[in-house]
Amino acid sequence: MKNIILFITFLICLVLTSFIKNNTRTIEKKLFTLDTEIKNLIYKLDEANLELEYLTTPENLIILSSKYLDDNFNQYNIANIYYFDLTQSKLEENSLKMNQKEK
């Protein structure tokens, strides 16, 4: 009787060990794929940052602006720039005022 109990516990431990080992393998595979995805995303982010730094250098901005933009720019003072709020209540008030003026 004692031998049967030991044999059954041995089999249970053997099955559990193989089950746990297989689960850890699948988890390691998932971790490996996630790690490679993270490395690829970091590489793409570094390339994008490098491209941004290159494109926003003053020399390159001058070249791009002369190539694609018009030369007639107006210079604004910061005090002349206002915040424009487009909330629903403001739109309703403006439409009511316009309707009253039309009448």
Image: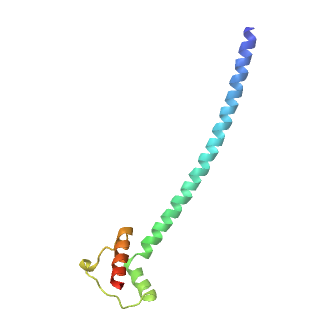
* Side of 59 where 24 appears, left or right: right
Q: Is 70 drawn above or below residue 81 in the view shown? A: below
In the rendering, at what x and y percent does residue 29 appear? 64, 46
Residue positioned 44% across, 76% down in the render: 55
The N terminus appears in which quarter of the rendering? top right
Residue positioned 71% across, 25% down in the render: 14
The C terminus appears in which quarter of the rendering? bottom left
Q: Nearer the viewer, residue 75 or 10?
A: 75
Instruction: Name the outermost residue toward the top.
Output: 1
* Side of 16 where 62 appears, left or right: left
Residue positioned 58% across, 51% down in the render: 34
Q: How is the image coloured?
A: rainbow
Q: Nearer the viewer, residue 56 or 76?
A: 76
In the rendering, at what x and y percent does residue 67 appear? 45, 88
Q: Is 20 drawn above or below residue 101 in the view shown? A: above
Q: Quadrant of residue 64?
A: bottom left
Q: Quadrant of residue 70?
A: bottom left
In the rendering, at what x and y percent does residue 35 appear? 57, 51
* Side of 51 where 5 appears, left or right: right
Q: Nearer the viewer, residue 82 or 91?
A: 91
Instruction: Name the outermost residue toward the left.
Output: 79
Instruction: Name the outermost residue toward the front.
Output: 103
Q: Nearer the viewer, residue 99 or 24?
A: 99
Looking at the rendered structure, the number of numbered marks drawn on it comes to: 0
Residue positioned 37% across, 79% down in the render: 58
Q: Is 10 drawn above or below residue 19 in the view shown? A: above
In the rendering, at what x and y percent does residue 80 appear? 26, 80
